Image (cartoon, rainbow, N blue to C red):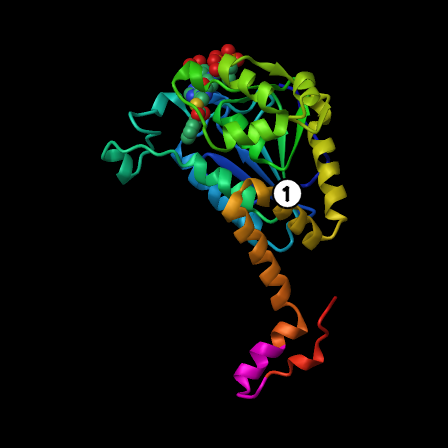
């Protein structure tokens, strides 16, 4: 196994079984840790990932999230086919004991899109099936030169009709997205770069150093500007939900203004608000 080093002193936290959560220098690194199945996810993996992404969201020290897989052979090979039941993936919780499966990767996809901080996918080896859909949902992707991308749904009896298909089509174009989904071929890192599915390809041993350097570059930028740009880029394609997020950000900024605070203060002080103090901007 190639040693991937970056010189970053990651601090591990949280109690997880299927993932690892680490932070350093304003970056959160979230790693799927099931290398024996090429980091395929099961319901538990996804619940833990949701918890970790929430931790990164809530940590005001964190400005960028790196999402990756353990080892150098795979970022993620999608849903764990060995525990796929008749209607979804079966965990070991009470719901699964009733024979009811889950498709809870869909919740994680939405969470990554709505996280108000850039999420960078760091891919070594396979990014396949539902794993590649997660990669597509991330804001940026840095790939190692051994990375392999592809969808397998129509080969294994599955498909992702949401972000997996139309977001991929937005990313690489309609014809290419159809090819990827209809033929279930595998594509090299160089081909993924060429079609615009990833942002950069670097030698495997430099993967983390390069990804961290992109993260540091973003950390030097205005966090609110990054948040608004992410929301703006997603707003159109996320429809009403995208507009709701963007409007929510506008509300947050308005709450931070003296004008909005005058409304709140006037209510608390039982007086008329003095909105005349604020300009009616052109
Ligand atoms: C990724 C591969 C192309 C790699 O091939 P390779 O030959 O290098 O390695 P092996 O095949 O020998 O794999 C090593 C080891 O890992 C196990 N493994 C790999 N992938 C998975 C997996 N997804 N699930 C379970 N186990 C896996 C493999 O069995 C080996 O272990 P052994 O003990 O058996 O030796 C190749 O592995 C491959 O093609 N993998 C399957 C990729 C795949 O089809 N993924 C699922 C696609 S569907 C999906 O992900 C999905 C999930 C959702 O939750 C959805 C929700 C809603 C809508 C759609 C969804 C969806 O499409």
**At 64% from the left edge and 62% from the top edge, which residue is drawn?**
253
The percent coordinates of residue 61 (x first, y second) are: 65, 53
The magenta segment is: 262-272
Residue 275's quadrant in the figure?
A: bottom right
Task: Report the side of 175 relative to 217 (left or right).
Answer: left
> Looking at the image, which is closer to me, 148 or 208?
148
> Looking at the image, which is closer to me, 130 or 77?
130
**At 40% from the left edge and 37% from the top edge, which residue is drawn?**
104
Spot the residue most to the left.
98
- Work out which quarter of the rendered image holds the N terminus and state it: top right
**At 62% from the left edge and 45% from the top edge, which residue is drawn?**
23
Q: Residues within 10 Å of mark 1 (few under 14, many from 20)?
A: few
Kindly tell me whether residue 197 is visible in this rendering: yes
The percent coordinates of residue 15 (x first, y second) are: 47, 44
The percent coordinates of residue 226 (x first, y second) are: 69, 48
Residue 269 forms part of the magenta stretch: yes
> Looking at the image, which is closer to me, 268 or 25?
268
- Work out which quarter of the rendered image holds the C terminus and state it: bottom right
Q: Is residue 182 above or below residue 53?
A: above
Say what secondary structure mark 1 lies in: helix
The percent coordinates of residue 11 (x first, y second) are: 61, 44
Task: Report the side of 119 relative to 205 (left or right).
Answer: left
> Looking at the image, which is closer to me, 237 or 4?
237
Q: Which residue is mark 1?
A: 233
């Amino acid at each position: 196994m190639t040693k991937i080093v970056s010189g970053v002193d990651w601090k591990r936290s949280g109690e997880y079984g299927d993932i690892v959560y680490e932070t350093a220098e304003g970056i959160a690194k979230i790693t799927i840790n099931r290398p024996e199945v090429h980091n395929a996810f099961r319901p538990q993996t996804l619940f833990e990932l949701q918890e970790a992404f929430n931790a990164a969201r809530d940590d005001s020290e964190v400005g960028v999230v790196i999402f990756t897989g353990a080892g150098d052979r795979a970022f993620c090979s999608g849903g764990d086919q060995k525990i796929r039941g008749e209607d979804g993936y079966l965990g070991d919780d009470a719901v699964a004991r009733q024979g009811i499966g889950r498709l809870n990767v869909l919740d994680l996809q939405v969470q990554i899109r709505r996280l108000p901080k850039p999420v960078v996918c760091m891919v070594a080896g396979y990014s396949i099936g539902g794993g590649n859909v997660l990669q597509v949902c991330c804001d940026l992707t840095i790939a190692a030169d051994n990375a392999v991308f592809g969808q397998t749904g129509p080969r294994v009896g599955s498909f992702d009709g949401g972000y997996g298909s139309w977001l991929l089509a937005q990313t690489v174009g309609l014809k290419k997205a159809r090819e990827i989904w209809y033929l279930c071929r595998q594509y090299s890192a160089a081909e993924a770069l060429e079609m615009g599915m990833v942002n950069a390809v670097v030698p495997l041993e430099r993967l983390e150093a390069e990804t961290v350097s992109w993260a540091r570059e973003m950390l030097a930028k205005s966090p609110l500007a990054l948040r608004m740009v992410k929301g703006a880029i997603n707003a159109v394609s996320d429809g009403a939900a995208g507009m709701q997020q963007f409007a929510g950000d506008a509300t947050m900024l308005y709450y931070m203004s003296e004008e909005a605070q005058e409304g709140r203060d006037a209510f608390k002080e039982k007086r008329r608000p003095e909105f005349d103090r604020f300009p009616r901007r052109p």
